[in-house]
Image (cartoon, rainbow, N blue to C red):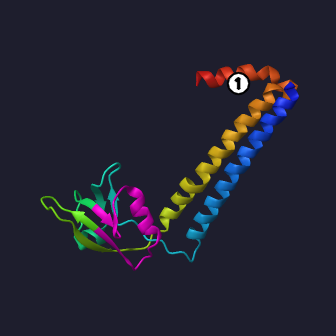
Amino acid sequence: MAPKTKSVALYACLGGLFLIAASDRARTTWDMLRTLLPGARLAQAPLGIAWGGNLVQAVSPQAREAGLSVGDRVAAIAGRPYTGRAVLGRALNGSQPGGSLAVDVLTAGSTAPRRIEIPLVGLDRGNLALLLILGFFTPLLCLLLGFGVALFLGFAAGIVPALGAYRARITDMLRTV
């Protein structure tokens, strides 16, 4: 394969990957914006669960009043066995403020779980800016930087001959970082 044909094929692959990544980012962004639009009401998580386990690490005032304590172990959420943090996310995704969340917990010294109904409150609007930054702007920046570097290095490699001399310097700089 001729060098020019090879570089065109590589850029076609890079462009295809970019389109796939950009379309996924657009779909995810649309889902997030639809959720965060002014009319949307989001329920705040009433408890925090340790990574890799089922130990309750944090409780909201509403959860505390309902009988949940730090150190309890989660057995099920909304009737689904607790297999990981995604179970809590799915349960909250289908909930709204004013509703309740059923959590089955094992307290210290008990052998059978007991059900606690925790009233749900709305998500604090101050958290929306953080959600937008973490859920939209950070992944978008990573996507643009990643493809931008690949595109720039490709141009420096030979599509723009004037930049070809800088490719070795750029590659060496990236290796030292």
Residue drawn at 33 percent across, 56 percent down? 49
Q: Nearer the viewer, residue 39 or 10?
A: 10
Mark 1: which secondary structure? helix
Q: Amino acid at mark 1?
A: Ile
104 w.r.t. 22: above or below = below
Residue drawn at 79 percent across, 26 percent down? 157
Q: Is residue 26 left or right of residue 93?
A: right
Residue picked out by circle 1: 170
Furthest-front residue in this view: 1
Residue drawn at 73 percent across, 50 percent down? 19
Indicate yes or no whether the magenta region holds residue 82. Answer: yes
Indicate yes or no whether the magenta region holds residue 83. Answer: yes
Query: Do we see residue 113 in this rendering?
Result: yes
Q: Position of residue 64 (x, y in %)?
A: 25, 68
Furthest-left residue in this view: 109
Q: Is residue 15 left or right of residue 39?
A: right
Q: Nearer the viewer, residue 81 or 141?
A: 81
Q: Position of residue 171 (x, y in %)?
A: 68, 23
Q: Position of residue 57 (x, y in %)?
A: 29, 55
Identify the image quadrant of the N terminus. top right
133 w.r.t. 163: above or below = below
**Range covered by the magenta-colored residues:** 75-103
155 w.r.t. 110: above or below = above
Identify the image quadrant of the C terminus. top right
